[in-house]
Amino acid sequence: MSDIMEMLVRRGFLWQSFEIYGGMAGFIDYAPLGNNLRRKIENIWRKYFVINERAVEIDTPTIGIEEVFIASGHATSFTDVAIECENCGRVYRADHYVKEKLGIEVDETVEAVKEVMDVYDLKCECGGKFKEPAPMNLMFSTKIGPGKGKKGYLRPETAQGMFVDFKRLAGYFREKLPFGVAQIGRAYRNEISPRQGVIRLREFNQAELEFFVHPAEKTHPDFSQVASDKVKLVDKFDNEHEMTLSEAVEKGIIANQILGYFIGKTRRFLLEIGINEDKLRFRQHKDDERAHYATDCWDAEVETSYGWIEVVGIADRTDYDLKKHSEYSGEDLTIFVPYTQPVKVKRRRLVPKMNKIGPTFKEKAKKIAEAFSTFNVNSDADEIEIVVDGERIKISKEFFDIEEVEEEIAGEKIVPHVIEPSFGLDRISYAVLEHAYDKDVVDGEERRVLRLKRKVSPVEVAVLPLLSREPFESKAQEIVSLLRSKGIYTEYDDSGSIGRRYRRFDEIGTPFCITVDHQTFDDDTVTIRDRDTTRQVRVKIESLPTILKELLESERDITEFGEVFR
RNA sequence: GCGCGGGUAGUCUAGUGGUAGGACAACGCCCUUCCGAGGCGUUAGCCCGGGUUCAAAUCCCGGCCCGCGCACCA
């Protein structure tokens, strides 16, 4: 186990799930400190991507019914048929392998693959025989209800919940674009081989924002806020750039302004929670790498001991999802967008003469008249041909008049496009911890210290008696109660010597230690010690809550708040 | 899923068939006027299952977990 992983487990950030039963790959428990850290990161994410956008947050079920994933494409793209060689153990996607070797398209069913394998006596490249083809489904399936039940899947992303609720959401936003919908929650993928600690999990935490925009207006009103931010970019041709976002958008490296906006916002968010800027870059997906739904996609990648890992995907999913759900559900998932000026259109239309059509066409008369209303009149032909219930019918001039009308068109129905920043919270939390992990030397002794940003530190303040005896202990406990009552996450420790305790809290990244010493009993003051510098200032106990809150919300120096001690 | 290497207290580690040892950590007491000091004591371990053997942490088989490579990662 790596140095940092060992610490994270020992000190209570992350634990292997089901440990007493031997564990299970792909699942982790958030231990007390890790849970607190991730919650804090989530709350900062909310500030960035919900509160400061025209956006709302919702919470939808983690189990989805089959229909949702048939529409989204996950049911098919997740059920690849795999074939495995008995000899060398290599696993291939059956359709890819068959196409490559035999040049034929095979249906993605076990039966179809089996037939092709039998007929052509398909062998592995190494000459070995293949085992029976088997479905390789990366979604966990389940049954809803008793007995045979209804087929369901654990969601492989939180996104679908937002698309499924689109009609309601559009109403909530009074049918006005753009708007965003966010969801923070669990998602599940039955990974074949989860690895590398928290990097690939079978159950993981996502924070996703679906930002719905007019397809012709991929801009963001707040782009100017990030336009001059410099960003490290790697484009789909592996060219590296370091330039401002406005430059990147102008040069077309980033497809549109709104993608650029969310790249900028993502960068600021990651820096605020403590990702090291030197270890952050944005990489564009190559053409063959993009998911089935996306046109352009940029990943935020962070360098860790596992190499560069993807922590955020920012994709232009276009109208793919809404169109699919509209098609499969039969619901109209469009938004009516009024033109700034209504457009007047001259049009010629057919006016049916019902007194003639009726007697001639009898029961078909009504449908013929309906067909007229959508007929495009472009000539003064003597006869027109329309289709009613699949039957072509010729209708001569005596059955209708042609009339010229002027219509006013107020706007159009459009299917919004969606820009999706999707955050992997587990990887982000881990990267924050790794980037904060440091060793230095204090008084000639090596010290392990988590230099977490104050905003994400799981324990905010530790109160320590200088000596573990009365009256120091009681006084320290009093201060603990005071700080806790003000909502500050405070811990108390009287075990071992003062130095040992400082080191304990340094290791878990607690930014401030309050020490009760002899002088406390003379003038009601205590010292505040800064984790990173180990410097101390002396302040009045009564002013502690205010000072600590100010310190925790900023990265201000403690020496601004009191007289330097020692 | 395949291959290679691992799995001994909370952590690290010694232990190649015969009573499982240490360090650090944790906890208690003592000591202690600010950075892992010291003393005494305590808690705590052979991943799971099967086999071989008089006897298994140790040898064999299977599983689980961890690391690495391959494959997979819409």
Image (cartoon, rainbow, N blue to C red):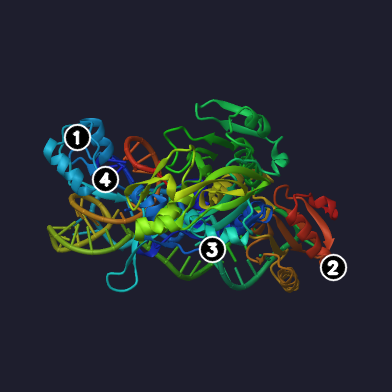
The residues bearing labels 2 and 4 have C-alpha atoms spaced at a distance of 76 Å
User: Mark 3 against mark 4, which lies toward the viewer?
Assistant: 4
Sort mark 4 into few (<14), some (14-19) or many (20+) by Cα contacts within 10 Å. Answer: some
Residue B46, image x, y percentages: 33, 59
Chain where mark 2 sits: A
Q: Earlier in the sequence, mark 2 or mark 4?
A: 4
The residues bearing labels 3 and 4 have C-alpha atoms spaced at a distance of 34 Å
Q: Secondary structure at mark 2?
A: loop
Q: Earlier in the sequence, mark 1 or mark 4?
A: 4
Residue kind at label 4, given as amino acid type: Glu
The residue where tag 4 is placed is A108
Q: Earlier in the sequence, mark 3 or mark 1?
A: 3
The residues bearing labels 1 and 4 have C-alpha atoms spaced at a distance of 19 Å
The residues bearing labels 2 and 3 have C-alpha atoms spaced at a distance of 48 Å
Residue A461 visible in this rendered orientation of the protein: yes
Q: Which mark is residue A18?
A: none
The residues bearing labels 3 and 1 have C-alpha atoms spaced at a distance of 46 Å
The residue where tag 3 is placed is A59
Left or right? Give the position of A27 relative to A223: left
Residue kind at label 2, given as amino acid type: Asp
The residue where tag 2 is placed is A524
Q: Secondary structure at mark 4?
A: loop
Chain where mark 3 sits: A
Chain where mark 1 sits: A
Q: Earlier in the sequence, mark 2 or mark 1?
A: 1
Q: Which mark is residue A124?
A: 1
Chain where mark 4 sits: A
Q: Are marks 2 and 4 in contact (CB under 8 Å)?
A: no
